[in-house]
Image (cartoon, coloured by chain):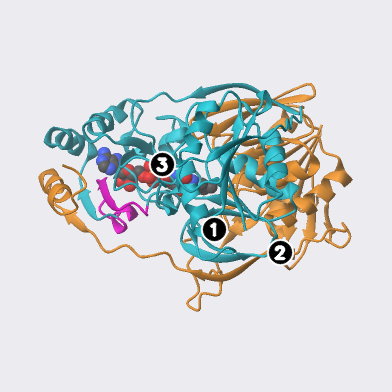
Amino acid sequence: MKVLVPIKRVVDYNVKVRAKSDETGPDLANVKMAINPFCEIAVEEAVRLKESETAQEVIAVSIGSNACQEQLRTALALGADRAILVETELEVEPLGVAKLLKAVVEKEQPDLIILGKQAIDDDSNQTGQMLASLLSYAQGTFASEIKIEGDKIDVTREVDGGLQTVSLNLPAVVTTDLRLNEPRYASLPNIMKAKKKSLDTLTPEELNVDASPRIETLKVSPPPERAAGVIVESVDELVEKLKNEAKVIT
Amino acid sequence: MSILVVVEHDNEELKGATLNTVTAAKEIGSEIDLLVAGFSCDSVADQACSIPGIGKVLVANKESYKNFLAENIGTLVSEVGKGYSHILAAATSNGKNFMPRVAALLDVSQVSEIISVLSEDTFERPIYAGNCIATVKSSDPIKVITVRATGFDDCEVEGGSATKEIVDLDSNLGISSFVGEELAESDRPELTSADIVISGGRGMQNGENFSLLEGIADKLGAAIGASRAAVDSGFVPNDMQVGQTGKIVAPNLYIAVGISGAIQHLAGMKDSKVIVAINKDEEAPIFQVADYGLVADLFEALPELESKL
Ligand SMILES: Cc1cc2nc3c(=O)[nH]c(=O)nc-3n(C[C@H](O)[C@H](O)[C@H](O)COP(=O)(O)OP(=O)(O)OC[C@H]3O[C@@H](n4cnc5c(N)ncnc54)[C@H](O)[C@@H]3O)c2cc1C
């Protein structure tokens, strides 16, 4: 089987992003960029499917500027076989990304598409579901375990109440949650090997997709600040303050 | 302008997150219908009818909607939603699952997890783990929106008399099926709607030690939450994770115990009214958002706290 893994280049999860002082957007000057952590889990899962000989080929795909090549090389170093960049300088919304990915799916005909459940920059949590919908595929979102049997996949999902398992017809879309696996680190030899793997570039025009945005960001502002707190000296003082000052317990 | 709110429920009870979503809908406009999609969900439809200020309660009662499979529900909602200017659902794991399918089928973008309504087409939503608030304006003819419960108060639940209308659509795509579920059983209040939440992190060391939190939770009527590290380490189940990629909570009182305060954790609790942090490391970032910080070993502080409540 063939597995497609869409990945996103985002600000590293350790960076605390602030709004620009003129509120025109987030201040991303000189911040460290990385592969979205949920996408990394997706790559890991696909590579494990290959290692267990369930999958024969793993293709990583990213949509964005030329700089995304860096994250695609990371995916290749983690074990993906080849990569595709759909290159665009424009900001693409999840719907546009899903449309571009649909075009890639139609070209590549994968049996399974594994994506991260959300990107940690815009926290939209939409792309996998939209892609599945556009393709009329079933979806297993927020996956903590997958099992492939014949032409079906069982997906255990992390839901608000606990865990839920669904069975989906393949081809299908899976989105990853944190407990699906623990991604490996790329070894130096694999980083070197990744440089030689194939990385093709396509454009939205070549895929004949209109990915223009529907949502305009009017401003990006800092969240309301919390007033400074105090350090209490003892449990007694804490209980006293919660009762008499904050009045949140009786 | 007319708004469709998709009701969150379990075929028996209407869930609290629906009430915040209705409040968000009321801030957008006054013509609001509710959709109850499920199976043997009459009691939910009745509860929906008693919410004041609702026009119609549309009821799609089919076996294919019993387990809320996104494929089937998404198709149904996109069909029913065609006649509306806005479609809203709570940003629960269920809402997040089917709503993007609705948006894609209608060829519109989705606005995820709004925390406030500025006008019928302009909303605020957190980005970058809540470190920035984006004001976004949608130009789509139908606005598909998920609502973050902590951004809106509950609406009233009694006094309404909406009329029920049957929707006879069976959108069974037949590409997915429900296998089973393991749902957490608890007598405690639900994490996302509790007045008081006490959460444990890696500092708790193991699952057994969470009993130190339980004694306090029992006394305070609190829900128990956790950091990602506590869930990943297997101390507690995934449904207890608070944070950017877990549950978003904003109780009156949040007590973080043995939690360092990573940005991803803060994203899920920093809108709580009062925050208490108990941590032995005075440098821990959690103290920067805490109203009351106690620098202490949790294994000494928790038993003392329980005894003094
Ligand atoms: C993609 C992604 C998504 C994430 N999503 C989330 C999320 O939704 N929610 C979340 O919580 N995290 C999330 N994280 C993880 C987050 O970055 C942190 O790793 C995590 O929150 C740390 O958990 P912790 O504070 O329990 O553990 P640590 O950071 O290890 O902190 C443990 C704390 O316990 C204190 N401690 C230890 N022993 C004691 C004692 N005896 N008495 C008192 N204090 C003690 C220590 O001083 C320390 O401050 C995410 C990370 C990524 C990359």
> Which chain is the one coloured orange?
A
Q: Is residue A155 left or right of residue A234?
A: right
Does mark 2's beta carbon lie closer than 8 Å to ligand 1? Answer: no
Give me the chain letter of mark 2.
A
The foreground one among A164 and B237 is: A164
Say which mark, if any, is on residue A213: 2
Which mark, residue B29?
1
Check disc 2 and give the amino acid type.
Pro
- Relative to A178, is B138 above or below? below
Judging from the image, mark 3 belongs to the subunit labelled B
The answer to which of marks 3 and 1 sits earlier in the sequence is 1
Q: Which dot, 2 or 1, sits closer to the camera?
A: 1
Q: Secondary structure at mark 1?
A: loop
Q: Position of residue B175 (x, y in %)?
A: 76, 29
Check chain identity for marks 2 and 1: say if they share one.
no
Q: How many marks?
A: 3
- Label number found at residue B159: 3
Q: Which residues are drawn in magenta?
A: B270-289
